[in-house]
Structures are given as structure tokens and as C-alpha cells.
Amino acid sequence: MAVPSVDTRPSPERDVSASPVALNDGSSPFHTGPREGQVKRQGTLPPKQWRSQHLLSFDGGGIRGYSSLLILKELMTVVERIEKAEDASVESSYDPLPYISPPNNRLSKKPSRKITTFVNGSGGPRKDTATANGNGTAPQPTPQQARSKFLPCHYFDFVGGTSTGGLICIMLGRLRLGVDECLEEYEQLGGRIFGNPRWASVKPSRRGPIPAPRDKYDGRNLQGAVEEVVARRLPKSQLRVGAGNFTSARELCRTAIFAYQWTRLSGSFEYGPPGCDAEGPMVDPENPGAYIFRSYDHWGPSERDNRSQNPGVCNPGASHSIPIWQVARAATAAPFYFDPIEIQNRKFGDGGFGTNNPVRELYFEARYMHGNDPRAVTLVVSIGTGQAKKDELSGGLFAKYIGYFKAVRQLATDSEREHRVMHIIRDSLSEMHCNLEYFRLNVPRADGLGDMKLDEWKGKEGRRTLDKIRCVTLNYCRKTDMQQELEKIARLLVDQRRARCHDDIWGLYATGMRYRCTVTHCWNCQKLRPSGDTLREHLIQTHSENINISDEAELDRLVEQGRCAF
């Protein structure tokens, strides 16, 4: 495969509105930008700590995605240690703001079954036995269950993944969960998804007496499981306005989910690249296979940029205002496992069959979000699910699935190929004096994790499978060279968060909290402002005739009253 050329041309002017903390009207909320009543300066750069973007990418890999989460847990444990070593008063990644506990809404109770869940990186299950509903409801946390208060969404600007890696990104990025909560939910998702295969692999055909193949798992189980996670973990303020929308506040950590687009041709649906010849399945050239679901707006590169050489620029446009469960289904609809899903007159399947390691796509996605500036991305962390053997799916009954087998055989080499491409990109940027720190964290094939099938679920509640993944992954994480890598990554993450947390718009990035004017008859009452200070300034400059601007208590009351939580 030819390596795409890397465009390292510096942009002559930076689009401030592409910053992760820009306002909806395109104005900059940074303290270095123009204040209300001043002339807006064009091309104003945000502070250095906000121009440096950190990316987190997850491979697809079925139940082996549990290994990715365990690796991330080890990384966040090192992050917490460094944070507290430098300042013992730091209690969470929200610092200096108070910690906000992730939502855990109680759902209606149904007959329960016992489960045992891991909650820390040191090994061993909880001493207490929790219960989970038959419909997958999570056990309610108790004070004894110590959970990390350092969230990945405060250290990474973009999270992206495909297949079950996409599920992880939804929980970490869109739902903004900590690693412990994500591990707990992933275990239960594994039980709901892989613990209930269909008894028969064929179904009656509408075309005749010959039965047709059907996927191993019922997509409705996955849909129900994801809907329950969303109902538990989404703030009630968001649940009141819908069933959980994938679109997020643009100031928060951005989530990109990579899927594969299907197209109807001659009444069948097949995988394949645009314009594929007769040796493989066909796809309409007007509907290329790769597709990105975004929690944020991305309006694409400028006309002078060559999109064909930068595959990360895909279906640019507004964020996807669709239910979160639909994005999850689209990302995980692998052939033989789940039926494809139709969303807005398009059919989608598992993004792992386009690329099982989306790190390059995520890198270019973030670059083009910042004017294709090669200096925009300074850290990329790619986490795999264990180096796999080539044949991960067994044979099928019908010749129409030959295209699937070809795609599957490529998955094992695809992830490592993308890893090598990222090394080339990093080296080329280094020659241009642009620094990119790139890390690939993945259990080696020799450690045995690659022997595990994507849908393995052995032992009571899958405990044998999860224990094996846990043992192999923790042994990998405790190797000396791996510990050194984790320390280096954690240091970069901590340094950037600590530089950002003293900025006056840290609260906007950390919580999504914005402010609006609630003074009667204010024509700008719907304008959302990035901080309490900017609202206070608006009150003083605009409403001096309506309120007593010398009364600090009154100003504090109006600022508090104008808080708008995402």
C-alpha cells in the first residue's frame, strides 16, 4: 500500500473557530482575543496550550477491546500518580474545579442475576457481589468502591475508534465516563452482546425454500444494551430533551466513530471499495465506503487541499444529530455478527472492515479541523486489542460472503500497517521541525491474546474470557519498556492539563458549562458565553441602566442564574 504524502505546509492564517473551545458564533472565548465592544482581530491565535491537540485512537477487536480499556486504565493510574505527586491537593482532573461524579441513573428493576466486576488495575474482583438486571442494568456504586476521578476526556482533545473501539469512544468521549465506569459497562455489554448467540445460523428465505444465512447475534440486543448505558450515564438534563443525541457541545472532547457505508445494488449488500471489479463485491462510486460519525461539526478542508491524499477528510458537514445507539450499531455491524443498520437512507456496517486501526484517519481528521496545520497535533496514542492472527472468522455457507473473508484476512495486518504509516508520518514531520509524539500500545502476538476469537465468552458470566484478557494485558503493562512508555505519555498529558486548567475558560472545556444573560428584555439572552467573567463583563457594559453594577452580590447572582449546563 502506498503511503499518502504528508502535507506539512504551515497555514498562513489559523481559523480560531476550529479550536475545541470556540463559541458557536465563531468568536474566540480565549482571554487573548477581543473583548465585547472591541474590534475583532482576524487570525488571533489561542494560547499555546490550546493549540496542541492530543488524540486517542482505539482499534476494533470484539471482546478483546477489554484489553484496550485495561491498558488505558494503567495509563490513567500513572497520570493520577503524577498529578498528586506534583500537587497533593489535586483530587480530580477537574481541578481546580470541584469533582463532578458521572451520572448513574437508576433504571426500573427486573429479576436480577449476580455478576462480579473489576474496578481497579491491581487485579482481583470486588469483594462484594453486585447484581445486574436481566436487561443489563448496572449495579449502583457504593462508597467502598474506589474509582478514579481522573477522566481521559480532560487529557485528550479527540477520541476515535471503530467496531467495539467505537463503543469505548462513545463511553469515554460522548458520555465522558471514567475508565472504571467504562470497564464496568464494557463487561456488561460483553454479556449482553456475546453471551446470547442465536441458536440457528439460517433463517427462512423470502425467495424460496432454500434458507438464507443470518448473523450470529441479534442487533436488537446490542441496541437495547447501548440504550440502557445511555439512560444510566447521560445527565438527566440531556435525557429530558431526547433519547440521547450523539451531538455534543463543541467545546468538549470530540468523538469520531469510524464506520463502513453499505450501498444497495441488485438487491444485495456487500463490502468493497468504490468501483471494485468483478473479482470482489461492488459499491456505488458515489457512496464511498469509509464514513465518520462526529459529535462535532467539521466543514472540510479548503479547496486548495488535496482530499484524495488525506483519507481522514470524510463526509464533512454538521455533527450527527442522531441517537447514540444508532452510531454504536453502525460501528459494530460486522458481517456474520450483526445485521447492518439503516440510518437516514444509508446502510452502515462495522468500520473495522474499512480499517481496523483508524489512527491515521483520526490524525488527518484533527489536522484538518485546525487548517491542516502540521503543528496542530502533538500527541497520538493508539491502543490495540492484541496482535491477531489472520483468520478470525470461520467459514460460511454461501459464496456471497467471499468478499467478507478477504476483508477479514486483511484485518490482522491492517492495524500494524497503519502503525508503520504513522511512523513514516512522524519522521516526515520531524524533518520539517514539527514535533509529533506517537505511541502504539498493543499486546504482542506472542503473549497469546491474538488466539482469542472476537466473540469469545467462556465461563460463568464470561469470567474465564475476561480473566485471560486481564492477566495477559497486565503482564504486558508491567514490562519495563511499557512502564517507561506509560510514564512518558502520562507526563505529556499532565503537563498540558495543568497548563490549561489555569486558563479562564477551563470550566468550559472541563464541563461544557456556559453562561447566558437572564436580564429581562436582553436581546442577546440566547447567546452562550464561555465563562462567568465574560457574562459579568456583558452585564456591566450592556445593562448598567437596569442593574446596580456596583453591587457585587447582584452580579454574582445573575452570573449564577445564567449557568447553562450541557
Image (spheres, rainbow, N blue to C red):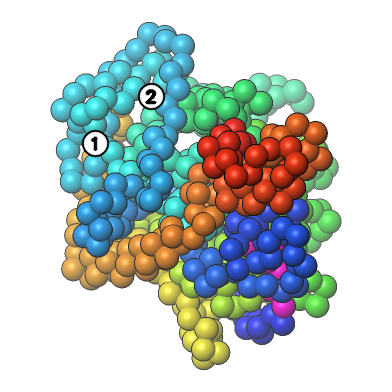
Could you say where residue 43 lies in the image, as x and y percent from the top left?
A: 72, 74
**Disc 1: which residue:** 146
Identified at 71% across, 35% down, the residue is 519
Could you say where residue 239 lies in the image, as x and y percent from the top left?
A: 59, 26
- Image quarter where the C terminus lies is top right
Say which mark, if any, is on residue 404.
none
Asked which quadrant contains residue 539, the reply is top right
| Up/down of 6 relative to 156, above or below | below
Relative to the observer, which residue lies in front, 412 or 163? 163
Q: Secondary structure at mark 2?
A: loop
Closer to viewer: mark 1 or mark 2: 1
Alpha carbon distance from label 1 to label 2? 16 Å
Magenta segment: 13-19
Q: Secondary structure at mark 1?
A: loop
Relative to the observer, which residue lies in front, 306 or 261? 306
Amino acid type, residue under disc 2 in the picture: Ala
Query: CB of mark 1 within 8 Å of CB of mark 2?
Result: no
Residue 14 on the magenta segment: yes
Label 2 CA crowd tier, 10 Å (few <14, some 14–19, many 20+): many
Mark found first going from the N terminus, 1 or 2? 2
Relative to the observer, which residue lies in front, 500 or 340? 500
Amino acid type, residue under disc 1 in the picture: Ala
